[in-house]
Image (spheres, grey):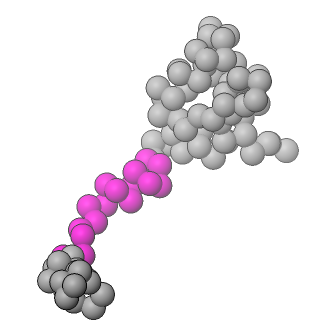
Amino acid sequence: MATPYLTDDEIADICAPLVMPAAQRRYLAGLGLIVNKKPNGRPLVARGEFERVLIGRQPEAAAQNAAGGQPNRAGLLKLFTGGKRGAQAQGR
């Protein structure tokens, strides 16, 4: 049964010939992985994160930002023109 994160052996295999944990973290981050740091300094990479990069998908946050969402223009105008609870300092 696979663990939810890559083992040290799997990371060593991916990063070969790099053996220093800091160098491995930099290398993995350079591949586009989200890399956390274990208390012993070694890289911690979720297996799902590795698979995401392996198939070439963007992280969820980047995918949402790339979707081109537009600001709520009507809400912004209402805020500046004093609509419901907007620009409360006008009457003061």
> In the rendered image of this protein, does residue 21 appear above or below residue 44?
above
Query: In the picture, which quadrant includes the N terminus?
Result: top right
> In the rendered image of this protein, does residue 25 appear above or below residue 76?
above
Q: Position of residue 41 (x, y in %)?
A: 71, 23
Farthest residue, direction front: 92
Q: Nearer the viewer, residue 35 or 16?
A: 35
Q: Nearer the viewer, residue 2 or 74?
A: 74
Magenta range: 58-74
Query: Which residue appears at 23% of the width and 80% of the height?
Result: 89
Q: Position of residue 55 (x, y in %)?
A: 50, 42
Q: Position of residue 80 (x, y in %)?
A: 17, 78
Q: Quadrant of residue 11?
A: top right
Q: Position of residue 70 (x, y in %)?
A: 23, 68
Query: Which residue appears at 66% of the width and 31% of the height?
Result: 37
Residue 85 among magenta residues: no
Residue 61 among magenta residues: yes
Q: How many discs mark residues in the rendered view?
A: 0
- Using the rendered image of the protein, determine whether residue 78 is visible from the camera's viewpoint: no
Q: Quadrant of residue 7?
A: top right
State left or right for residue 58 relative to residue 26: left
Q: Quadrant of residue 64?
A: bottom left
Query: Which residue appears at 55% of the width and 38% of the height?
Result: 34
State left or right for residue 64 relative to residue 38: left
